[in-house]
Image (spheres, rainbow, N blue to C red):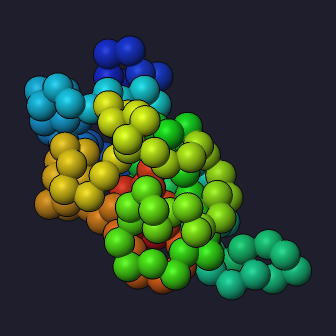
């Protein structure tokens, strides 16, 4: 399904999640504290699973339309995170792999935080990549698994 949001380029997701994602985005807009700049939905790619000759072997949730990235330029993907909770202090110890630096103090209106308007809007049906266990923190990412 194709989705649009005023001022944001259209994106694609699985039709099964269309109504829930639209509802979550309406909730975020009505709250008024967060500004969506960019959403990346469906994109084909093997970005999960073990490496085989330097290439990942499994398709990502984006490949099935069951994931989105919100404001990736403000909510990066980090690895090497031996942390339980993402905070400005703990994220400083992690390695930014892609996207922009996560800084809720400098950019509160575009940075996703735990228990904020974006995480609350999606948590009834998707998981936030910033709260997944392990050393990867994907702060832009929401999907059925969080990965």
Which residue, as the protein is rendered here, is positioned at the far top?
Answer: 7
In which quarter of the view is residue 130 placed? bottom left
| Residue 66 visible in the snapshot | no
Estimate the x, y position of residue 124 in percent, counting from the top left: 14, 60
Left or right, 124 with reference to 7: left
Residue drawn at point x = 88 percent, y = 80 percent: 53
* Along the viewing direction, whichever of 34 and 15 lies nearer the viewer: 34
* Along the viewing direction, whichever of 88 and 112 lies nearer the viewer: 88
| Residue 34 visible in the snapshot | yes
In which quarter of the view is residue 143 placed? bottom left
Estimate the x, y position of residue 100 in percent, counting from the top left: 59, 43
**Above or below 128: residue 100:** above
Left or right, 111 with reference to 134: left
**Above or below 80: residue 110:** above
Residue drawn at point x = 35 percent, y = 72 percent: 85
Estimate the x, y position of residue 121 in percent, counting from the top left: 17, 48
**Above or below 90: residue 107:** above
Estimate the x, y position of residue 76 in percent, counting from the top left: 54, 51
Which image quarter holds the N terminus? top left
* Along the viewing direction, whichever of 46 and 88 lies nearer the viewer: 88
Left or right, 66 with reference to 101: left
Residue drawn at point x = 17 percent, y = 26 percent: 32
Residue drawn at point x = 38 percent, y = 61 percent: 87
Which residue, as the protein is rendered here, is positioned at the far front?
Answer: 89
Q: How many marks?
A: 0
């Amino acid at each position: 399904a194709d989705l649009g949001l005023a001022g944001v380029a259209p994106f694609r997701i699985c039709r099964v999640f269309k109504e829930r994602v639209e509802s979550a985005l309406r909730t975020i807009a009505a709250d008024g504290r967060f500004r969506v700049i960019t959403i990346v939905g469906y994109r084909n790619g093997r970005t999960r699973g073990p490496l085989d000759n330097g290439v990942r072997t499994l398709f990502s949730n984006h490949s099935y339309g069951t994931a989105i990235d919100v404001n990736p330029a403000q909510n990066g993907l980090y690895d090497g995170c031996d942390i339980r909770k993402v905070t400005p202090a703990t994220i400083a110890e992690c390695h930014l792999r892609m996207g922009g630096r996560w800084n809720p103090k400098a950019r509160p209106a575009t940075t996703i935080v735990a228990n904020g308007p974006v995480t609350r809007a999606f948590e009834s049906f998707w998981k936030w990549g910033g709260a997944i266990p392990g050393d990867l923190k994907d702060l832009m990412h929401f999907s059925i698994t969080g990965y």
